């Protein structure tokens, strides 16, 4: 396998050298670099081999892949065919069986410490990982082996990032997110169920273009897409501030597109780019189509009560309990106890007063 | 005078009509500012999680939720600044001003007093003990509800506030940036903020009741003491 450079790929796609150099100048200008940087960008693109990507699938539903192939900016075909060297992805590749598996070994040896490992889904750890078999071996083994030679790891989706539905209580297979089994590699979490297509392609092209990982927040998510909550950029936010809420799915407020906060929208607690980037090429996103955010890109979102409750259920106190119901009950009990205690106190005081009087009488 | 028998223990003998200056002016002022801010915080906090019915008309004619949230944040700032001033006064004020910030857990007399106070509330003890400052049971509750609970509410509250203020603001840098990851996500921080808030509400119910009760039953001024600062032992 020969290693193609970006320049070679662009030439192969019919782009002239003149256009290529123009592209380099424009890139330098848009990055705010001096004109002298343009030749250096051209040089890098002419000489640097494209970084290969291995895309592994663990315990997952392929919704991340489904989202990824629908990317519009850039188009998924451009990403796969010209921007990155997606050398292994068992759902997208033509090869199968032993030939396919041989590619992983090839990449690992040839690009040791120099390829990106993208993981969709997560490894289950119970029963020695037998709940997810990859090419006849437990997925956890393949993951650890491949990760050992990777430069960085991208955790696609909530499965790889947090655990998602297969890790929801009681998590029978002990599905475990990637960062809890791989400790020695930089991990970029791109949570969401699935993540937004454009966010996926943007993260991967950023890493390939700039040869470094994007700036991450404390939980390992790229700040540029997960730095703000859905609520902060929601187009229905004015209705929230005004106090205009949908109270029922079929009321006038729902038709008018008021805030879905009372219907349990998790926008105020969810960090994602849905309200800015939106979905399907910027057409819409859940709140725009009339349903609250379910918080799919947040840690443990399956275990945080119903999608239609604003205040999280606390299961230890019964199925339908939440902090406010418990608190109000306890406060009510305290109030009743105080009243009862006051009555008994008054009674005992009256009685001791009587005995004092009778003592005084004697 | 037999009034200073023990730092945190009961006073042994006291002549009826003896008056001691306990709560200095800043402590009293703080108490009432704090009480008021907690009432505002509890009510507005509840209304933020369970908003009032929808208001009709155009969104730009109203700012109801905005005002409720503003009241919550303003009261939170007053609570926070009051808390800091109160800590300062604990350092420079009299020794009663320090009582709120520590529990004398190594003091045997204090523990005996605590259990005696519990027995008094269970109607087992017939006579109340008199204390210049807080009795051990009140001291215990106040420490956990106001000092520990207050710090918890400030930390989680400013963490939630920082989420809206967003990255780069002091509240996000100082609180949100580590509190939210500590819980995993914002939803659990909300839940705990609610739980402790209700704990403080329960404390307030008990606090008001016991203050009035001891005023009557223990023959010493409680309610007027936090207004005038003087505690009078009536018998």
Image: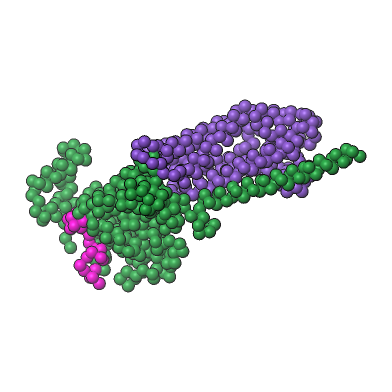
Magenta segment includes B227: no
From the viewer's perspective, tell me whether residue A149 is left or right of residue A30.
right
Q: Is residue B55 above or below residue A119?
A: above
User: What's the image's color scheme?
Assistant: by chain
Q: Which residue is pictured at 52% across the width and 49% down the height?
A: A324
Whether residue A276 is visible here, answered yes or no, is yes
Q: Position of residue A37 (x, y in %)?
A: 18, 40
Q: Which residue is pictured at 55% across the width and 40% down the height?
A: B150
From the viewer's perspective, tell me whether residue A362 is left or right of residue A13.
right
- In-front residue for pair A242/A91: A242
Q: Which residue is pictured at 39% across the width and 59% down the height?
A: A163
Q: Quadrant of the C terminus of chain B?
A: top right
Q: Which residues are magenta?
A: A76-100
Magenta segment includes A95: yes
Q: Which residue is pictured at 41% across the width and 62% down the height?
A: A167
Q: Position of residue B135 (x, y in %)?
A: 70, 39
Whether residue A203 is visible here, answered yes or no, is no
- In-front residue for pair A9/B60: B60
Q: Colour of chain B?
A: purple
- In-front residue for pair B232/B2: B232
The letter of the green chain is A
Q: Is residue B131 above or below residue A161?
A: above
From the viewer's perspective, tell me whether residue A15 is left or right of residue A324.
left
Q: Position of residue B107 (x, y in %)?
A: 70, 42
- In-front residue for pair B84/B123: B123
Q: Position of residue A217 (x, y in %)?
A: 37, 46
């Amino acid at each position: 396998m020969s290693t193609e450079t970006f320049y070679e790929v662009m030439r192969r796609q019919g782009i002239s050298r003149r256009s290529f150099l123009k592209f380099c100048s424009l890139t330098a200008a848009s990055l705010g670099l001096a004109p002298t940087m343009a030749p250096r960008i051209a040089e890098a693109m002419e000489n640097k081999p494209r970084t290969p990507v291995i895309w592994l699938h663990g315990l997952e539903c392929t919704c991340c892949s489904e989202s990824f192939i629908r990317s519009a900016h850039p188009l998924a075909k451009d990403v796969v065919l010209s921007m990155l060297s997606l050398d292994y992805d068992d759902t997208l590749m033509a090869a199968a069986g032993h030939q396919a598996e041989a590619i992983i070994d090839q990449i690992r040896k040839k690009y040791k410490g120099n390829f990106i490992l993208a993981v969709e889904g997560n490894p289950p750890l119970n029963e020695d990982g037998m709940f997810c078999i990859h090419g006849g071996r437990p997925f956890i083994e393949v993951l650890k082996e491949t990760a050992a030679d990777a430069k960085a790891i991208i955790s696609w989706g909530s499965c790889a990032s947090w655990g998602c539905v297969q890790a929801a209580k009681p998590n029978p297979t002990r599905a475990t997110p990637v960062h809890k089994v791989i400790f020695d590699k930089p991990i970029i979490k791109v949570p969401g169920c699935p993540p937004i297509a454009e966010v996926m392609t943007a993260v991967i092209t950023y890493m390939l273009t700039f040869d470094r990982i994007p700036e991450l927040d404390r939980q390992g998510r790229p700040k540029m897409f997960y730095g703000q909550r859905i609520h902060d950029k929601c187009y229905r936010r004015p209705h929230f501030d005004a106090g205009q809420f949908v109270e029922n799915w079929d009321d006038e407020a729902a038709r008018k597109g008021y805030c879905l906060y009372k219907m349990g929208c998790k926008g105020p607690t969810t960090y994602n780019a849905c309200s800015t980037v939106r979905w399907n090429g910027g057409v819409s996103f859940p709140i725009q189509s009339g349903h609250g955010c379910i918080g799919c890109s947040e840690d443990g979102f399956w275990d945080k009560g119903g999608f239609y409750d604003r205040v999280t259920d606390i299961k230890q106190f019964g199925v339908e309990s939440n902090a406010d119901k418990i608190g109000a009950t306890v406060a009510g009990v305290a109030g009743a106890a105080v009243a009862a205690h006051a009555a008994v106190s008054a009674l005992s005081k009256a009685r001791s007063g009587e005995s004092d009087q009778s003592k005084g009488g004697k | 005078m037999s009034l200073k028998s023990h730092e945190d223990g009961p006073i042994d003998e006291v002549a009826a009509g003896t008056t001691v200056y306990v709560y200095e002016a800043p402590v009293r002022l703080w108490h009432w500012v704090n009480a008021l801010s907690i009432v505002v915080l509890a009510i507005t906090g509840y209304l933020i999680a369970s908003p009032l019915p929808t208001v009709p008309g155009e969104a730009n004619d109203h700012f109801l939720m905005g005002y409720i949230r503003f009241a919550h944040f303003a009261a939170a700032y007053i609570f926070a600044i009051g808390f800091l001033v109160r800590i300062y006064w604990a350092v420079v004020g009299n020794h009663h001003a320090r009582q709120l910030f520590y529990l004398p857990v190594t003091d045997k007399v204090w523990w005996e007093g605590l259990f005696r106070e519990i027995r008094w509330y269970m109607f087992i003890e017939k006579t109340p003990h008199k204390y210049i400052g807080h009795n051990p049971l009140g001291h215990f509750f106040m420490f956990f509800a106001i000092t520990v609970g207050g710090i918890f509410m400030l930390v989680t509250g400013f963490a939630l506030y920082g989420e809206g203020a967003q990255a780069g603001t002091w509240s996000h840098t100082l609180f949100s940036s580590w509190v939210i990851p500590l819980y995993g996500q914002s939803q659990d921080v909300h839940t705990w903020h609610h739980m402790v808030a209700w704990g403080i509400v329960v404390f307030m119910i008990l606090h008001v009741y016991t203050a009035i009760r001891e005023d009557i039953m223990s023959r010493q001024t409680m309610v007027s003491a936090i207004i005038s600062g003087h505690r009078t032992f009536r018998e």
